[in-house]
Image (cartoon, rainbow, N blue to C red):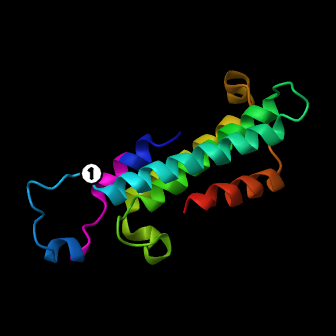
Amino acid sequence: IMDGPPAQSLGVEPVDERILKASPRNVSENIITRPLLLRAITSSILIVYVTLKVYSNELDDGHVTRRDTTMTFMTFVNCDLFNAYTCRSADRCFYEMSLFENISFVWAIGGSILGQLAVIYFPPLQEVFQTEALRLLDLVYIIILSSTVL
C-alpha cells in the first residue's frame, strides 16, 4: 500500500534531457550530495511531524480508537505518496512534471490509493487492520495536510 510500487516505478521514469546533455560527474564526488541529503532529511521530518500532529489531534480523549489510527495511517501513507511524486525529479518542481510522463507511476499510485480505500472501507479489511470508514471531509483534510510534502 505504501511506497513499494511507487518507488519501483520511479526506476522507469523517463530520463530528463538535461541529464543526457550534462557532463559526467567526477568519480571522486559523492553520489549522495548535500542537497540530496538535506532534501531527504527535511521531507522525513515533515512527514513525521504531520503524521504525529494528526495523531495527537485525534487522540483528544487519551484513548486510542480506530479513528485515531485510521487518520494517522492515511496521513502517513498519503505523505509517502506525495513524497514519491516529488522524488520523480531532483531538479524540477512538482508542478513542472506531467503526471502521465510515467504510466507505471500512475498505476502504482492508483493501486496504492485503491489499497488504502479498501483498508478503510471494506469491512473484512477493516477488521484485519482495525480501521474505520472516514468521512469525505476527513479525506480532504488528510490530502491537504499530506500535500505539504510537495
* Residue 109 in sight here: no
Main secondary structure along the magenta-highlighted residues: helix
Q: Amino acid at mark 1?
A: Ile
**In-image side of 48 versus 95 (left or right):** right
* Viewer-proximal residue among 18 and 43: 43
Does the magenta run of residues contain 77? no
Task: Please provide percent x and percent y for residue 147.
Answer: 62, 60
**Which residue is located at x 54 percent, y 56 percent?**
82
Q: Residues within 10 Å of mark 1 (few under 14, many from 20)?
A: few
Q: Nearer the viewer, residue 50 or 124?
A: 50
SS of the residue under disc 1: loop
Whether residue 133 sits left or right of residue 93 in the image: it is right
Residue at 10% across, 66% down: 24
Which residue bears the numbered disc 1?
32
Nearer the observer, 3 or 106: 3
Report x, y in % for residue 75: 66, 46
Can residue 43 be seen here? The reply is: yes
Stretch in magenta: 8-17
> Which quadrant of the figure has residue 52?
top right
The image quadrant where one finds the C terminus is bottom right
Q: Is residue 32 left or right of residue 124?
A: left
Whether residue 86 is situated above or below residue 44 in the rendered picture: below
Q: Residue furthest right?
A: 61
Residue 50 image point, x, y percent: 66, 48
> How many numbered markers are drawn?
1
